[in-house]
């Protein structure tokens, strides 16, 4: 069965007041009802609680559906009196729905590895120079390569090469995750308070 693509979606109060945090929760509830109607699989990745009520942001992974995503992506406006400050005059509240670049975490699968043996270079005696004990391993999906020639044993070098490849892939995943987190934070600052994609009266 073909695996369905996923979108990463962030609902954010845009560093707005407690009312906006409340409407982040309301927006998620409305989106959840629609996802259930459309039978879209989703899961919550992160929920950052608000100061009083609701959430500063909710990040979720949802089954790819461009029509659904495009209908929500942008500013969402709620019109109504504050539930938290009875004398507050403001009646227009904005929150944002953003799509975050979905980086696919690299995984190390044995079938994706290609091994090549070669002669070791440098000091090590006649045995090192005559026997193909060094190992180069290539991760075929990314073309990442590492070489191990630490040991006179080809089997041992193969193990060392795989461990080094694992470390490289972990480093790449960590960098991608850091960029994704930075993009999520920037969304808090980029919320447009106008030109709403949807308007709700409360």
Image (tube, rainbow, N blue to C red):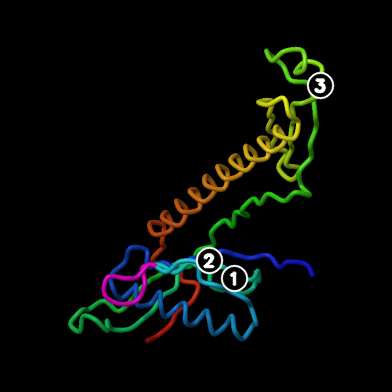
The residue wearing badge 3 is: 131
Single out the mark in the foreground, 3 or 1. 3
**Tag 2, which secondary structure?**
strand
Q: At 55% from the left edge and 72% from the top edge, which residue is drawn?
A: 43
**Of the numbered discs in the image, which one, if any, rests on residue 62?**
1
Instruction: Tell me whether circle 3 and circle 2 mark residues in contact (CB < 8 Å).
Output: no
Q: Which residues are magenta?
A: 48-56
Q: Is residue 101 left or right of residue 143?
A: left
Where residue 32 sits in the image (x, y, percent)?
A: 53, 81
Query: What element does badge 3 sit on?
Result: loop
Residue that numbered label 2 is attached to = 9
Image vertical order of residue 134 relative to residue 8, above or below: above
Residue 46 visible (yes or no): yes
Where 37 sits versus 189, above or below?
below
**Are the residues tagged 2 and 1 within 8 Å (C-beta)?**
yes
Task: Kindly identify the residue that appears in the image at 58 percent across and 74 percent down.
Answer: 42
Question: Circle 1 — which element?
Answer: strand
């Amino acid at each position: 069965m073909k695996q369905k693509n996923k979108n990463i979606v962030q609902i954010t109060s845009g560093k707005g007041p407690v009312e906006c945090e409340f409407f982040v929760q309301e927006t998620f509830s409305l989106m959840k009802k629609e996802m259930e109607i459309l039978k879209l699989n989703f899961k919550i990745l992160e929920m950052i609680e608000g100061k009083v009520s609701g959430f500063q942001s909710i990040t979720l992974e949802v089954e790819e559906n461009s029509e659904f995503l495009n209908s929500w992506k942008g500013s969402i406006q709620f019109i109504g009196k504050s539930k938290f400050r009875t004398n507050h005059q403001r009646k227009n509240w904005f929150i944002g729905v953003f799509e975050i670049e979905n980086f696919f975490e690299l995984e190390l699968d044995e079938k994706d590895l290609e091994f090549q043996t070669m002669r070791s270079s440098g000091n090590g005696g006649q045995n090192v120079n005559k026997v193909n004990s060094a190992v180069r391993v290539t991760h075929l999906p990314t073309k990442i390569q590492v070489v191990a020639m630490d040991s006179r044993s080809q089997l041992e070098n193969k193990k060392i090469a795989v461990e080094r490849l694992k470390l490289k892939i972990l480093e790449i995943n960590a960098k991608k995750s850091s960029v994704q987190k930075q993009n999520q934070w920037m969304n808090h600052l980029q919320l447009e308070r106008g030109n709403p994609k949807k308007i709700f009266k409360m």
